Structures are given as structure tokens and as C-alpha cells.
Image: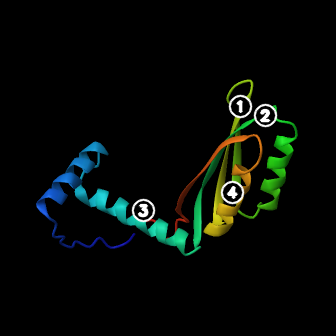
Amino acid sequence: MSELVRFGVSLDKSLLDKFDRLIRERRYTNRSEALRDLIREELVKKAWAEDMEVAGAVTFLFDHHQRDLQNRITDIQHDHQKLIISTQHVHLDHDNCLEIIAVRGKAGKIQELTNRLKATRGVRHCSLSISSAGKDAR
């Protein structure tokens, strides 16, 4: 476990009031936890911008009646199999399926996978949620 360090922060009163409102809205128990989350979020953005190793989820909705779409999706996933940790396929209704792909690897490669899925005809929506790869997530 890492060492906990205290430090002081000086803020304009109006900025602190806005931050405290945000903390209440998001139901943080204290300022420290909210500040830790903001720092972690910025570090993930930095890792993404520097094409470092990240983890995340690609989530997409598609029409399973679209001719040959499932085969095209599978081919794309096979082309990126080194990034894929697992896949979950959910039948939402008669026409729509949801797929969630857990990924880990270089940010740029994960973005390539996401872009290919998003551009595939029949995929109705596709989004990427990123996180750190876990090494520095504390």
C-alpha cells in the first residue's frame, strides 16, 4: 500500500464553493476523494494522449438482422485479438444486440478497433470508455 501524504491547496472561495457543490452532487464523502478522482482522470487522459497502455471497454449496439454483420464484427475482433480480454454479447430484443468488449493495450490500437467497429455498416452506436491499465490507478 502506498504512503498517504497530506498537502495544502489554496483556492478562490467561489471556486471552492463550486467544487463543494460538485462533491455533494456526486456524493463524495470528502474533498480528498474527489480530488484523487480528478487527478486519476487527468492521468488517464495523459496516458491516452501519449499512446501508453490503457484498459477500457468498447460498447456497441447493432442490428443482428443485417446481412453478414456478425461475421464482419467477428473478423474485426480477430484482427485485434491481442487487445481483447473478453467479450460479452447481449440479445436486447428481436432486432438489437449489445456487445461489450473488455480491452487492454496501446491507446492508439484500441482506438483503431473502436473506429473499425463504429464504421461498420449495421453498427448503430459504438463508444469507448477508457481507464488506466491498473499500474498507477491508486
Question: Could you classify mark 1 by the number of other residues whose Cα lies within 10 Å: few (under 14), some (14-19), or many (20 or more)?
Answer: some
N-terminal label among 2 and 1: 2
**Label 1 belongs to which residue?**
96
Which residue is painted at 30% across and 61% down in the image? 35
Instruction: Tell me how far mark 4 sits from mark 3, CA to CA.
Output: 22 Å
N-terminal label among 4 and 1: 1
**Label 3 belongs to which residue?**
41
Q: Secondary structure at mark 4?
A: helix
N-terminal label among 3 and 2: 3
Depth check: 2 or 32 in front?
A: 32
Instruction: Tell me how far mark 2 sits from mark 4, CA to CA.
Output: 19 Å
N-terminal label among 3 and 1: 3
Asked whether disc 2 touches disc 1, contact meaning CB atoms under 8 Å apart, the reply is yes
Q: Is residue 106 visible?
A: no
Q: Is residue 57 visible?
A: yes
**Amino acid marked by disc 3:** Glu
Instruction: Tell me how far mark 3 sits from mark 1, CA to CA.
Output: 32 Å
**Amino acid marked by disc 4:** Asn
Which residue is painted at 61% across and 52% down in the image? 57
Q: Name the mark nearer the viewer: 3 or 1.
A: 1
In the rendered structure, the answer to whether residue 1 lies left or right of residue 44 reads: left
Q: Secondary structure at mark 1?
A: strand
Depth check: 31 or 16 in front?
A: 16
Residue 52 point in image, percent of width and height: 58, 73
**Amino acid marked by disc 1:** Asn
**Label 4 belongs to which residue?**
115
Instruction: Tell me how far mark 2 sits from mark 1, CA to CA.
Output: 6 Å
Q: Name the mark nearer the viewer: 4 or 1.
A: 4
